[in-house]
Image (tube, grey):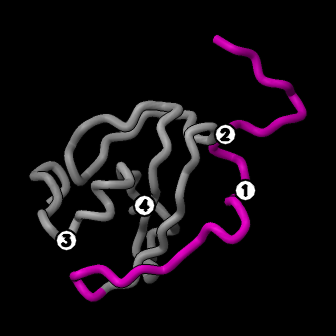
């Protein structure tokens, strides 16, 4: 396992990239905050709710959550970029519905 310098925060603790935040309106009428995650900052594996396949660490993707999310970001989901772009063409997998 690679070592991390003690003066550098872990990947998940890095602040968001400036200017990358955007708001999108979903087909359900809710506003979503969407942030791209470059491959170099993707340090964990996630499960995409669009296709139910794994997003491996080091893979660029997006993270999205409802703007009016009262859970403090607990409902954010990591999506493959094409799955997020095509989410209106299909519903979420059974696992997330």
Alpha carbons under labels 1 and 4: distance apart: 16 Å
Q: Main secondary structure of the magenta part?
A: loop
Residue topped by disc 1: 15
- Tell which residue pokes out farthest to the bottom in this image: 29
Callout 1: SS: loop
Callout 2: SS: helix
Q: Which mark is residue 88?
A: 3
Disc nearer the start of the sequence (1/4): 1
Q: Which mark is residue 11?
A: 2
Callout 4: SS: loop
Residue 86 image offset from top left, x and y in percent: 24, 63
Residue topped by disc 4: 76
For the residues labelled 2 and 1, say whether their Cβ atoms are less than 8 Å apart. no
Q: Is residue 10 above or below residue 30?
A: above
Was residue 6 drawn as part of the magenta stretch in this picture?
yes
* Res. 26 image quadrant: bottom left
Q: Residue at coordinates 25% horizontally, 37% vertically from top-left?
A: 53
């Amino acid at each position: 396992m690679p070592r991390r310098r003690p003066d550098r925060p872990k990947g998940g603790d890095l602040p968001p990239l400036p200017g990358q935040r955007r708001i999108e309106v979903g087909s359900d009428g809710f506003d979503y905050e969407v942030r791209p995650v470059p491959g170099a900052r993707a340090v964990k594996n996630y499960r995409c709710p669009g296709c139910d396949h794994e997003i491996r660490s080091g893979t660029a993707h997006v993270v999205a959550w409802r703007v009016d999310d009262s859970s403090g970001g607990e409902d954010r989901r990591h999506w493959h970029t094409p799955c997020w772009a095509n989410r209106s063409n299909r519903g979420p997998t059974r696992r997330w519905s």
